[in-house]
């Protein structure tokens, strides 16, 4: 028995064989035969195939399941008697009126069958857009096509027949008038290719009743809006509110996002944009794409996330011009200032200055500049040659399909917020009841896996570890699906090459476990997983939870580690720094034991710490803070008004406290060292460029031992309390930071330039650990024989065994 089906409503009925195969009937598409005209009464009609429950009426749910998406969108037009279902005559009338449409007339919204504002490869296949499928790599920039990419690809084709399936005989669209087209439920001729006129809500709302009616839309010449009224009218009240109108106009008007700066949208000036603020600013396209734009999943947009969206979608921020560091550094002082960036036309860099200026010194070094340029769409920097630049660019393009870094730390701050929100009793543990109330169904399904210590609740570290592992898995699955172009659940070497998976190709022999020439999902995932981090024999603590950790201090009384977290710019007065309390086994007991965000605590960017009697003393931006050692309760502060970047602390042989000020890497202000004594204000004992930006401090004889952070300085020096400097020991690399005296009187010294921890003993210098990014103020656990090294830029602490004989 043969069933012949007519090509019907737009995308869905063009591919009716696909839709009807789901209910078990093989069909061939015919564009010339009416839907139910002269069929064999013993054969099933198209109506009966969609009416799966046999109640002689088609519900919207049944139409959806049959993939009749255009019928669903134009439901009110088809449902003549408004009873919310279609009888056979209503169904036949609708499909007859729309049966003469070919693939070349399909609009973006009609191909986008699931209404997610993007077109997937599968949706393009279902719509019969064969040329688009063949040239998918050319059209697809971000994994799926947005409306702009779809439109651009159509325009770039030499003719519609190149992009779309050929028109079948007799399928030419009738040249109806506007009125006739409206009655038939189809768009008036010519509206497909023209964007909506740029109309504001107030211009269309002629009676000023805060709503746009169908008549007002028609009078304003918005034919496309009139024709797709049901789609625009989200609440089905037959009028459009301002948000509904704005959303439709931004989706279909082919216009960029309104030119709004971050500060204009951030109405409450909290340095984040909420959904509500985006709606009030009429950025409805942003609201619709919120989950894709909100990279860290914290339900607000940072300045970086907002700027990236505006850059991609035609808003206020322009792409970065292709400039090298030396071109922007106009005064050749080896730093780029904000003024130089402005003069070079680098608007995005100026707007995201705080993000680029990682060291918080209001100028950018070559590395900071180059990293920012790579991150935001340019690989320019000071290369040794043009060839090297081209090679770097080529490499970047090849690697763009590698799975994103999704390991620990990729979105830990968002996960911490999610944990805190779900932890309604604030006991630092998440129960199954709390997870259920927070709607964490996937977590509940795998609760036993997440609860690593089997105590029935999840700590923050257990929660973060599980969620990040799940995110890694999801990223690998997404990468596999994108590479698997023919959707056969296997990735070939050719598919991997087209997807730019260079690293995978390099280890193909190891990845292909069964030697069949292709990779299954399991083989692919195993080969693409990044190996567990091993830093020699070091244990890693707090990766992804710490925020620029600067000092680690072992408390021998409580037997815990304290970690100072800058959490922002090195010199920022943002009052969001914190100190973590960590168990020696690596468990974070309290991430924000002392928290600058609390009203009673002032803590901007804590760095050096030491114990002195019953006090924990902390070097902070603008002053030195005193806390109770046992409880973390704030006691008092000593303000040092002319300081720039207070860094490390030491108690001298005279019983007074000394604090280093590392100063700026540019000319002013220079470094300094201050003396703090009870009953007096701060006293400057050394200040100027001759001291090479003092950082690490130790008491030494009748004075101090200083580790300088200047880019050229490799030498530890002693400093008498009267300010006289003398050489002490020379190190292999400069930019010295941490300084710690071990029980055997040897010294641990860290070098940012060398990425190394050195040990200095009896005039000899040996390497203790290397390959550490930004090693800051090192500590030592004497009870266990451990060296504690904070890696400031990697947001982690490394714990190395180091026994002292």
Image: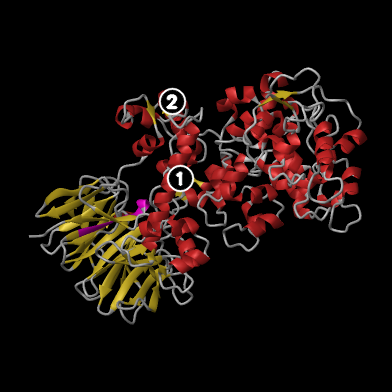
Residue 100 on image: x %, y %: 80, 27
Instruction: Farthest residue to the front: give it.
Output: 42
The rendered magenta stretch, by its main secondary structure, is classed as strand
In the image, what residue occupies the spot 69% across and 45% down?
53
Q: Earlier in the sequence, mark 1 or mark 2?
A: 1
- The vertical placement of 379 against 58, above or below, is above
Assess disc 2: are there few (<14), some (14-19) or many (≥20) residues with their C-alpha within 10 Å of its C-alpha. some
Residue 720 on image: x %, y %: 21, 65
Q: Nearer the viewer, residue 324 or 793?
A: 793
Residue 306 on image: x %, y %: 59, 49
**Mark 1 element type:** helix
Residue wearing tag 2: 497
Q: Is residue 791 magenta?
A: yes
- The vertical placement of 637 against 686, above or below, is below
The answer to whether residue 258 of the structure is visible from this angle is: no
- In the picture, the disc for residue 474 is 1
Assess disc 1: are there few (<14), some (14-19) or many (≥20) residues with their C-alpha within 10 Å of its C-alpha. few
Q: Is residue 158 left or right of residue 460?
A: right
The coloring applied to the image is secondary structure
For the C terminus, the image quarter is: bottom left
Residue 303 on image: x %, y %: 56, 52
In the image, what residue occupies the spot 72% across and 21% down?
160
In the image, what residue occupies the spot 26% across and 69% down?
560
Q: Is residue 243 left or right of residue 639?
A: right
Q: Is residue 155 magenta?
A: no
Q: Nearer the viewer, residue 545 or 439?
A: 439
The answer to whether residue 723 of the structure is visible from this angle is: yes
Q: Which residues are magenta?
A: 787-794
- Mark 1 and mark 2: span between their CA atoms? 21 Å
């Amino acid at each position: 028995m043969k069933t012949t089906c007519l090509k019907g409503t737009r995308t869905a009925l063009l591919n009716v064989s696909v839709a009807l195969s789901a209910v078990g009937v093989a069909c061939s598409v015919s564009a010339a035969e009416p839907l139910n005209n002269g069929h064999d009464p013993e054969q099933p009609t198209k109506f009966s195939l969609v009416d799966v429950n046999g109640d002689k009426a088609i519900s919207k749910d049944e139409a959806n399941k049959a993939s009749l998406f255009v019928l669903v969108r134009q439901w009110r037009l088809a449902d003549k008697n408004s009873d919310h279902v279609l009888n056979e005559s209503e169904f036949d009338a609708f499909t007859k009126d729309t049966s003469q449409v070919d693939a070349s007339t399909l609009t973006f919204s009609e191909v986008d069958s699931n209404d997610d504002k993007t077109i997937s490869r599968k949706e393009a296949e279902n719509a019969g857009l064969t040329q688009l499928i063949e040239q998918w790599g050319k059209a697809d920039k971000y994994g799926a096509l947005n409306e702009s990419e779809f439109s651009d690809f159509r325009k770039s084709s030499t003719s519609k027949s190149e992009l779309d399936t050929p028109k079948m005989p007799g399928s030419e669209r009738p040249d109806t008038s506007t009125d006739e087209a409206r009655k038939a439920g189809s768009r008036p001729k010519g509206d497909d290719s023209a964007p909506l006129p740029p109309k504001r809500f107030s211009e269309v709302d002629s009676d000023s009743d805060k709503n746009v009616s169908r008549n007002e839309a028609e009078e304003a010449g918005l034919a496309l809006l009139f024709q797709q009224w049901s789609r625009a009218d989200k609440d089905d009240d037959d009028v459009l509110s301002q948000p509904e109108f704005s959303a439709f106009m931004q989706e279909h008007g082919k216009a960029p996002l309104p030119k709004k700066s971050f500060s204009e949208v951030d109405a409450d000036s909290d340095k984040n944009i909420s959904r509500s603020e985006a709606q009030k600013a009429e950025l409805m396209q942003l609201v619709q794409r919120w989950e894709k734009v909100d990279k860290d999943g914290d339900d607000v947009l940072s300045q970086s996330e907002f700027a990236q969206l505006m850059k991609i979608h035609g808003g206020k921020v322009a792409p970065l011009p292709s400039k090298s560091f030396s071109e922007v550094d106009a005064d050749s002082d080896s730093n780029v200032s904000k003024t130089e960036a402005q003069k070079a036309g680098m608007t995005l860099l100026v707007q995201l200055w705080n993000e680029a200026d990682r060291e918080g010194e209001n100028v950018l070094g070559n590395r900071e500049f180059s990293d920012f340029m790579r991150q935001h769409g340019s690989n320019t920097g000071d290369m040794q040659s043009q060839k090297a630049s081209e090679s770097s660019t080529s490499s970047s393009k090849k690697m763009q399909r590698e799975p994103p870094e999704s390991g620990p730390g990729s979105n830990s701050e968002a996960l911490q917020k999610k944990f805190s929100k779900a932890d309604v009793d604030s006991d630092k543990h998440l129960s199954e009841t709390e997870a259920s109330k927070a709607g964490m169904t996937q977590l509940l399904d795998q609760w036993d896996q997440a609860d690593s210590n089997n105590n029935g609740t999840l700590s923050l570290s257990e929660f973060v570890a599980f969620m990040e592992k799940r995110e890694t898995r999801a990223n690998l699955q997404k990468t596999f699906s994108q590479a698997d172009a023919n959707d056969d659940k296997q990735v070939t070497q050719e598919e991997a090459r087209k997807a730019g998976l260079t690293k995978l190709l390099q280890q193909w022999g190891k990845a292909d476990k069964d030697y069949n020439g292709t990779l299954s999902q399991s083989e692919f995932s195993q080969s693409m997983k990044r190996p567990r981090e091993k830093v020699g024999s070091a244990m890693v603590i707090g990766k992804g939870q710490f925020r620029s950790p600067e000092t680690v201090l072992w408390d021998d009384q409580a037997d815990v580690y304290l970690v100072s977290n800058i959490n922002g710019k090195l010199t920022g007065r943002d009052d969001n720094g914190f100190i973590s309390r960590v168990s020696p086994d690596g468990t974070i007991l309290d991430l924000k034991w002392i928290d600058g965000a609390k009203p009673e605590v002032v803590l901007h960017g804590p760095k050096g710490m030491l114990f002195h009697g019953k006090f924990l003393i902390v070097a902070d931006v603008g002053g030195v803070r005193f806390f109770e050692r046992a409880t973390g309760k704030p006691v008092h502060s000593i303000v040092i008004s002319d300081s720039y970047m207070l860094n490390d602390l030491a108690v001298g042989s005279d019983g007074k406290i000394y604090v280093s000020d590392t100063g700026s890497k540019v000319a002013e202000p220079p470094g300094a060292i201050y003396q703090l004594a009870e009953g007096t204000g701060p006293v400057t004992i050394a200040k100027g460029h001759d001291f090479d930006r003092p950082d690490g401090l130790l008491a030494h004889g009748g004075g101090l031992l200083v580790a300088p952070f200047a880019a050229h300085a490799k030498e530890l020096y002693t400093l008498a309390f009267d300010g006289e400097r003398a050489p002490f020991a020379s190190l292999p690399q400069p930019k010295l930071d941490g300084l710690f005296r071990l029980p055997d009187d040897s010294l641990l010294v860290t070098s940012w330039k060398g990425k190394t921890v050195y040990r200095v003993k009896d005039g000899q210098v040996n390497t203790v650990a290397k390959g550490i990014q930004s090693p800051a103020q090192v500590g030592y656990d004497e009870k266990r024989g451990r060296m504690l090294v904070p890696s400031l830029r990697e947001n982690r602490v490394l714990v190395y065994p180091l026994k002292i004989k």
